[in-house]
Image (cartoon, helix red, strand yellow):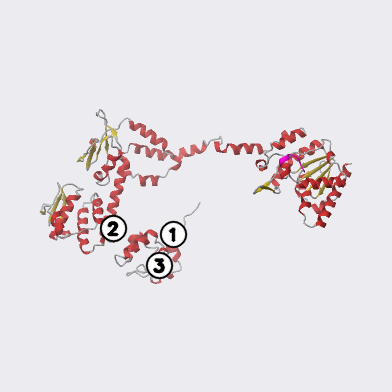
């Protein structure tokens, strides 16, 4: 997802971006081109989001196609009992 | 290098005045030194506030968001706050939308500082503890508080609104505020030894605090997030907290151990019903009248709740033949007698055809209460289920014990299930006598109401004939 171009729905589907962050990103797009650092500041951590977004200074390259992608980005499931 | 002296650490007006003057002169943020009165840079050039008028003349405008943010940020303890604000002010000239750029380092820092300040202000509202000043006339209160940031001025209004009728002083190391019922005044900060001593009310407060503490709901992390340790020093109740936390585990275990043995009031009804449902086999009825009254008040299963009354058996106590139906129907439930409804008509016709007089036969049901489902104004029959049959079998067994019939006829599957204690296929078992463990003979046949539901006239006639044959067989066996 290109953070500078994507619509709200596409951003909301991106792992690691919640409603609040997406609304802030969209507001920020009116001010300036978004860089990875901006996403990092707004989302408080960017590791889960990185493989799925493109910004002016960031492209995930082959990161998206890694076989262990889910393990890298999925939040750890809470262990019940 | 320009030196600006501010009157106090939270002198927003002074800062604004100086900032306007510096901006008119075009002084770069790096070459300004900000100092609060009493401290300063020996080598700097003092600036006099020439501010407001010249700035207005120069047509400067600043976004409202910046001014509001600056009023919060100036209450922060960080000595670099004046610098940060002036730098932001200068950057706003080139970029009017800067305040909306939340990821800009300066904006982000300023917002973070404002947030910290508002949190400190909130904590001050929560953690100031007033103490009665001994011997003051009229009654006056004083509190000692150490705020995380310079929030006394901006928070004093809250206490004035909250405790308008009370005379109080809040003493802090930065600034003290005093309310005499009419005016709010401020004085310089004092040291900790000026703090008021404990008062007699504090023991009550600690007792109350300890008693409302619920050891079973202990969440240390959440508590310390809301009540940071830096404030504990001045909270009278805080000295109880370590003990309360330490003893929570054993107190919870003790609470579990001492769980109440009496049922809660809302459970009383359920307990009563369960007690009455418990079989009390040693106290069986000793007469058929006792069976009749017992059936009416029976709560061995849940069917009593919706039925009008229990329907006991009827007939002579010396009967040699016992007929067991399924359960009372709508009419039976209302009249309290077995086999009086539409099925009763079929039943009477069959008895007459078989030559068996109804007056000499004990007629009863496997289940004594009417199980039904209300649909509109009608109560529709529902077949009783195994638990209900088993529960009611207790009554049938007592009827059998008291009457000792020679022959027992089970009308339909439910009755057969109750009489024989197991599921009997009607069609395969009917038409012959089967020995029962108590010495009587059992006969299985169709239920009269089953014949009412057979759509085909020929099959209905055939079924009726089978019923009559079985009843005649039973009557003959009963002698």
Q: Is residue B432 visible?
A: no
Residue range (magenta):
B334-339
SS type, badge 1? loop
In the rendering, at what x and y percent does residue B114 appear? 27, 52
Would you identify the image quadrant in which residue B314 lies? top right
Depicted B192 relative to depicted B471: above or below: above
Q: CA distance from mark 2 to mark 3?
A: 25 Å
Q: Is residue B338 magenta?
A: yes
Q: Is residue B144 visible?
A: yes
Q: Residues within 10 Å of mark 3 (few under 14, many from 20)?
A: some
**Mark 2 — on which chain does it sit?**
B
Depicted A66 relative to depicted B15: above or below: below
SS type, badge 2? helix
In this figure, which residue is indicated by the disc labeled 2? B108
| The disc label shown at residue B43, or none | none
In the rendering, at what x and y percent does residue B123 appear? 31, 44
In this figure, which residue is indicated by the disc labeled 1? A75
Q: Quadrant of the N terminus of chain B?
A: bottom left
In this figure, which residue is indicated by the disc labeled 3? A52
Kindly report the secondary structure that dominates the magenta region of the rendered protein.
loop
């Amino acid at each position: 997802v290109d953070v500078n171009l994507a619509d709200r729905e596409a951003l909301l589907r991106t792992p690691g971006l919640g409603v609040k962050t997406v609304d802030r990103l969209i507001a920020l797009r009116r001010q300036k081109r978004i860089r990875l650092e901006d996403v990092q500041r707004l989302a408080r951590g960017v590791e889960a989001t990185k493989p799925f977004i493109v910004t002016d200074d960031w492209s995930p390259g082959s990161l998206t196609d890694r076989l262990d992608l889910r393990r890298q980005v999925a939040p750890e499931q809470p262990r019940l009992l | 290098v320009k030196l600006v002296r501010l009157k106090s650490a939270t002198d927003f007006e002074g800062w604004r005045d100086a900032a306007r003057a510096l901006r008119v002169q075009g002084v770069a943020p790096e070459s300004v030194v900000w100092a609060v009165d009493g401290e300063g840079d020996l080598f700097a050039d003092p600036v006099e506030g020439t501010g407001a008028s010249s700035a207005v003349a120069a047509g400067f405008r600043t976004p409202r968001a910046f001014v509001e943010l600056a009023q919060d940020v100036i209450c922060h303890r960080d000595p670099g706050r004046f610098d940060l604000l002036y730098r932001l002010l200068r950057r706003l000239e080139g970029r009017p939308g800067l305040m909306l750029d939340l990821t800009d380092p300066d904006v982000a820092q300023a917002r973070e500082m404002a947030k910290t300040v508002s949190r400190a202000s909130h904590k001050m509202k929560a953690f100031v503890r007033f103490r009665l000043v001994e011997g003051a006339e009229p009654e006056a209160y004083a509190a000692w508080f150490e705020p995380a940031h310079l929030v006394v001025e901006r928070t004093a209004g809250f206490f004035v609104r909250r405790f308008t009728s009370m005379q109080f002083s809040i003493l802090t190391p930065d600034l003290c505020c005093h309310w005499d019922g009419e005016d709010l005044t401020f004085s310089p900060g004092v040291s900790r030894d000026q703090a008021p001593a404990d008062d007699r009310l504090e023991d009550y407060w600690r007792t109350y605090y300890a008693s409302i503490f619920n050891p079973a709901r202990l969440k240390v992390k959440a508590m310390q997030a809301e009540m940071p340790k830096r404030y504990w020093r001045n909270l009278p109740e805080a000295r109880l907290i370590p003990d309360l936390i330490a003893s929570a585990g054993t107190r919870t275990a003790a609470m579990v151990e001492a769980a109440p043995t009496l049922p809660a009031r809302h459970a009383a009804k359920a307990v009563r019903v369960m007690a009455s449902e418990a079989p009390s086999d040693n106290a069986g009825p000793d007469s058929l009248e006792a069976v009749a009254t017992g059936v009416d008040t029976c709560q061995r299963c849940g069917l009593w709740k919706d039925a009008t009354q229990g329907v006991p058996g009827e007939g002579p106590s010396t009967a040699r033949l016992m007929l067991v139906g399924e359960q009372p129907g709508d009419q039976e439930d209302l009249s309290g007698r077995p086999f009086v409804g539409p099925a009763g008509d079929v039943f009477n016709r069959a008895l007459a055809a078989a030559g068996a007089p109804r007056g000499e036969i004990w007629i009863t049901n496997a289940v004594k209460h009417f199980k039904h489902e209300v649909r509109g104004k009608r109560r529709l029959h529902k077949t009783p289920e195994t638990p209900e049959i088993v529960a009611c079998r207790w009554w049938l067994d007592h009827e059998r014990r008291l009457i000792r019939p020679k022959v027992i006829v089970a009308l339909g599957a439910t009755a057969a299930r109750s009489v024989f204690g197991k599921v009997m296929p009607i069609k395969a078992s009917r038409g012959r006598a089967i020995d029962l463990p108590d010495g009587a003979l059992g006969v299985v046949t169709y239920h009269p109401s089953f014949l009412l539901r057979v759509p085909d006239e020929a099959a209905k006639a055939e079924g009726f004939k089978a019923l009559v044959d079985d009843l005649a067989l039973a009557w003959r066996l009963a002698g």
